Amino acid sequence: MIRQRAAISADHRLTLDDPTRWRAQLATMKPGRVVVSVQSEKTLHSDRQRGYHWGVVVPFFQELWSAPRVAAGLDPYSKDDTHYALVLILRGSVEGPLGTALPIPTRTMTTEEYSAFDKDARAFAWDHYQARLPEPNECPEEAIG
């Protein structure tokens, strides 16, 4: 698949950001029919949002959910396992291979979507565990990168 950023002008003309790279990528493809699709660019979540999620939200649930496992002599949940569980609980899944459920990917979430995801995680912590997670603006910079 070839991906390229571009701009659409007021008169609806498409201008590629890097036409030379576009032509080079096209040259690697076999001649034949293709499907071209255009979508609006969206602002992806920030490093600070990721830092808050992985530095505050995930460790809280990781410790909470791992405690019974550790008490039973089992390994604690990993940060990745905890993150994926949160996604499945709060955002659901998409169909994966052979009908399996895969967590909705967070890497393509917008700033607003990621903010809502972590807001829902804070609400979940309160509703299910009566635990208040700090808001991102309440965290020291070193806690969230």
Image (tube, rainbow, N blue to C red):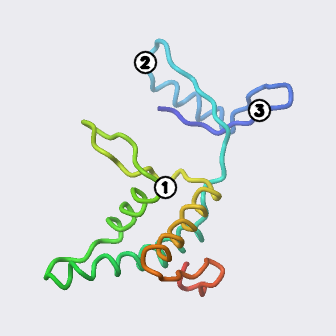
Of tags 2 and 1, the one toward the viewer is 1
Left/right placement of residue 37 relative to residue 11 reads left
Q: Report how far apart the C-alphas of labels 2 and 1 lie in the structure.
A: 33 Å
Nearest the viewer among 20 and 51 is 51
Nearest the viewer among 145 and 32 is 145
Residue 26's spot in the image, x, y percent?
A: 52, 25
* Image quarter of residue 47: bottom right
Q: Are marks 3 and 2 in contact (CB under 8 Å)?
A: no
Give amino acid for label 3. Answer: Ile
Q: Is 70 placed above or below 27 here?
A: below
Q: Which residue shows up at 59% across the image and 84% down it? A: 139
**Circle on res. 106:** 1
Q: Secondary structure at mark 3?
A: strand
Of tags 3 and 2, the one toward the viewer is 3
Q: Which residue shows up at 47% across the image and 54% down it? A: 91
**N-terminal-most mark, 1 or 3:** 3
Nearest the viewer among 102 and 108 is 102
Instruction: Give the residue at the far right of this rendering.
Output: 10
Q: Are marks 1 and 3 in contact (CB under 8 Å)?
A: no
Q: Secondary structure at mark 1?
A: loop
Q: Is 26 placed above or below 97 here?
A: above
**N-terminal-most mark, 2 or 1:** 2
Left/right placement of residue 64 relative to residue 91 reads left
**Circle on res. 8:** 3
**Residue occupied by mark 2:** 30
Q: Which residue shows up at 50% across the image and 54% down it? A: 107
Q: Is 105 placed above or below 49 here?
A: above
Give amino acid for label 2. Answer: Lys
